[in-house]
């Protein structure tokens, strides 16, 4: 069941990014800025290879659209600034969509929903 959910979320994410214009059609190579490592969404192996969920989504989109991507590891706080400045084409680290952020960047449809909670004792 969990595998089906992950596959479904991946497909919804890919479609959301494609419909939302996540990749520029005229570009043959897109630079993707991510904050690595941020487990479980981005990780780096001992030999420096980047992998996990956000990277898989971006690689799947690139394959579907016939684009090449270059992964650039940048600090999370710099991702939106880097997109706005044209230093990266896409920011793909898990980012909460807020009204303030949406004023300056074009978000895709969410491809992962995080339900966070605080747990306390009844007493």
Image (tube, rainbow, N blue to C red):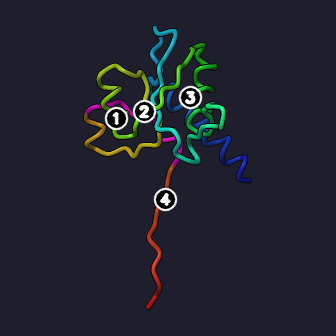
> Residue at point 30% right, 37% down?
102
Q: Earlier in the sequence, mark 1 or mark 3?
A: 3
Q: Mark 3: give few (<14), some (14-19) or many (20+) Cα within 10 Å.
A: many
Range covered by the magenta-colored residues: 104-112
Residue placed under numbered mark 3 in the picture: 58
Residue placed under numbered mark 2 in the picture: 74
Q: Magenta includes 106?
A: yes
Q: Earlier in the sequence, mark 4 or mark 1?
A: 1
Percent x, y of residue 51:
62, 35
Residue placed under numbered mark 1 in the picture: 78
Percent x, y of residue 86:
33, 19
Figure label count? 4
Q: Mark 4: give few (<14), some (14-19) or many (20+) Cα within 10 Å.
A: few
Q: Earlier in the sequence, mark 4 or mark 3?
A: 3
Residue contact between numbered discs 1 and 2, judged by CB atoms under 8 Å: yes
Q: Nearer the viewer, mark 4 or mark 3?
A: 3
- Main SS category, magenta section: loop
Determine the secondary structure under disc 2: loop
| Relative vertical location of residue 73 with respect to residue 24 in this rendering, above or below | below
Percent x, y of residue 90:
43, 26
> Which sits in the foreground, 85 or 64?
85
Determine the secondary structure under disc 4: loop
Could you tell me how far apart the alpha carbons at marks 2 and 3 are, in whole angstroms? 16 Å
Could you tell me how far apart the alpha carbons at marks 4 and 3 are, in whole angstroms? 23 Å
Q: Earlier in the sequence, mark 2 or mark 3?
A: 3
> Which sits in the foreground, 107 or 89?
89
């Amino acid at each position: 069941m969990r595998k089906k959910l992950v596959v479904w979320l991946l497909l919804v994410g890919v479609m959301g990014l494609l419909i939302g214009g996540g990749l520029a059609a005229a570009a043959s190579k897109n630079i993707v800025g991510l904050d690595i490592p941020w487990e479980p969404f981005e990780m780096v192996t001992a030999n420096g290879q980047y992998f996990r969920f956000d990277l898989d989504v971006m690689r799947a989109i690139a394959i579907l659209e016939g684009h090449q991507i270059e992964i650039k590891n940048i600090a999370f706080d710099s991702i939106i600034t880097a997109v706005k400045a044209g230093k990266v084409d896409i920011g793909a680290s898990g980012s909460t969509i807020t009204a303030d952020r949406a004023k300056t960047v074009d978000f895709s449809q969410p491809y992962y929903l995080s339900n966070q909670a605080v747990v306390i004792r009844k007493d």
